[in-house]
Image (cartoon, rainbow, N blue to C red):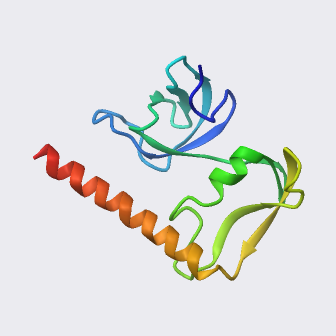
Amino acid sequence: MNITANKEGDRVELIKCTDPYTKIPPGTQGKVDFVDAIGTVHVTWDNGYSLGLVPGEDKWWTLIHQASPGTALVDSKEFGSNCWHPCRFIKDDGRCHRLYVCIYPERKNCQAVHAEITHLKKTQVRLMNTSIQIDHTIETLAEMLQK
């Protein structure tokens, strides 16, 4: 049973790996080879290494597939999860970069048009900032527990 949304051929980018001996730095991209029965996402990274990502332990983004310049093929599940990751798209100038907006949201698969958001609702920004603060607090507490 596959408990992740990733599938063979997906492109992913590493955010954080809990393996203390890994030679794969955050920001490295790779291709999903397969997802095993317990949900480990096995990836061949662009730097030549292979490493399985463990849901709940490691953190990574699933990158949106480019169909052609200015468009992307987006699955409805990916659309919901990839567009609102904290810090991924919001830059210091408050504008959203690399956000793909589906022009046919009622369809399961759609052609998405690359769009830059110049105005975000205050609630969305507040929720993103809260999510970032929660992640930071969790990491701080985990470090304290290890001491």
20 left or right, relative to 122: left
- Rendered image quadrant of residue 12: top right
Quarter of the image with the N terminus is: top right
Please, is residue 32 above or below residue 129 in the view? above
| Residue plotted at (56% across, 82% down) | 93
79 left or right, relative to 70: left
Kindly give the residue lying farthest to the left in the view shown.
147
Residue 42 in the image, given as x and y percentages of width and height: 53, 25
Residue 135 in the image, given as x and y percentages of width and height: 37, 58
Please, is residue 107 above or below residue 6 in the view? below
* Number of dots carrying numbers: 0
| Residue plotted at (53% across, 28% down) | 41
| Residue plotted at (29% across, 54% down) | 139
Please, is residue 37 above or below residue 40 in the view? above
Please, is residue 93 above or below residue 58 in the view? below
111 left or right, relative to 6: right
Residue 59 in the image, given as x and y percentages of width and height: 45, 44
- Between residue 113 and residue 45, name the one nearer to us: 113
Residue 115 in the image, given as x and y percentages of width and height: 78, 69
- Between residue 116 and residue 39, name the one nearer to us: 39
| Residue plotted at (63% across, 36% down) | 5
